[in-house]
Image (cartoon, rainbow, N blue to C red):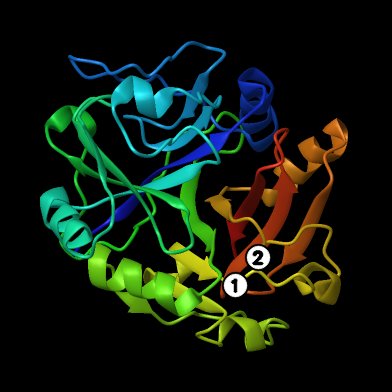
Amino acid sequence: MGWFIHHVNVQAHDVRQSAAFYRDIIGLKDGAWVYPATVGEVGHNPDSIAAFGSLNRGIHVVRAIPTFPRDNKLLHNPTIGGHFAFNVPDILVVKARLEAAGIAVSDAGEYAMSGVRQIYCYDPSHNVIEINQIVNPSGGPAPGAEETNDLRFEPGIYEGEWALHHVNLPAHDVRATAAFFRDLIGLEEMAWEPAADSPVAAYTSNPDSLAMFGHQNRGLHIAKPTPAFAWDNGFKHNPTVGGHFALVVQSLDAVKQRMDKAGVIYTEAGPYAMAGMRQLYAYDPSLNLVEIDEMI
């Protein structure tokens, strides 16, 4: 089954402040939200949402709306705590498997994004998951038949293009959460491709610590929170706790220079975990952990 990460939704206490971080420091270009003909009670205004990417793909920075489920007759609140969304070719097949397994599903329909039907559920670790499907051309291209999160590049404002590389979800039971994505969503579990002489190989090679969905480490990482991970690796940030998402940029050094100028604290991890990838971690202004990568 083809699939790709459609967007990452991050909660922000100050949407404009967080948007400035992604635009001015990381170098992403503001996107324009595209609405369907009939819009739900989404509460959008410049202080409640910012988008980076085209056709509603990419990054959504949102303010929490506690009444969002009530306002839209949903069981889940996609505005609180963040979530990630992946696109599949047949959402009804996935929904049927979820409901047959007794998992509560919120079917929002095409209510917020033009050409995109959306459903929400919890995974076994209580991460909010959005599954969506392109239902008409206004939603953009659907996944290819064999696609596993191929990089879909978007224009930047400084050094060139950027793309979503992966989402890292925390899981108290990695194998149970992996089974959810494999057996109910329909993703294929794949092998991790480690960096040469990786200092974290014992972690990344342990199926109880990490599960991987996608080619060449792209896609979905399901990770067991490990409190000592940052200490053991001399990091200022712990990428195994609380989840994070990763972007690929053209020049990590240019992003670092802007972070240094703005006083942003970061961890430059180097090519320590993923083959062919230099990695950096930082918090956005709302303390969402962001990984910024450069292919080497």
Regarding mark 1 in the picture, which secondary structure is present there? Answer: loop
Q: Which residue is mark 1?
A: 224
Q: Quadrant of the N terminus?
A: bottom left
Which sits earlier in the primary sequence, circle 2 or circle 1? 1
Q: Quadrant of the C terminus?
A: bottom right
Question: Can residue 186 be seen in the rendering of this structure?
Answer: no
**Residue at image location 20% in from the left, 66% down from the top:** 146
Q: Nearer the viewer, residue 48 or 291?
A: 48
The reply to whether callout 2 and callout 1 are in contact (CB within 8 Å) is: yes
x then y, percent, for residue 34: 30, 20
**Residue at image location 49% in from the left, 66% down from the top:** 221
Q: Which residue is mark 2?
A: 240
What's under tag 2, amino acid-wise? Thr
What's under tag 1, amino acid-wise? Lys
Find the distance from the CA under tag 2 to the CA under tag 1.
Answer: 6 Å
Looking at the rendering, which quadrant does residue 158 occupy?
top right
x then y, percent, for residue 106: 27, 41
Regarding mark 2 in the picture, which secondary structure is present there? Answer: loop
Looking at the rendering, which quadrant does residue 61 occupy?
top right
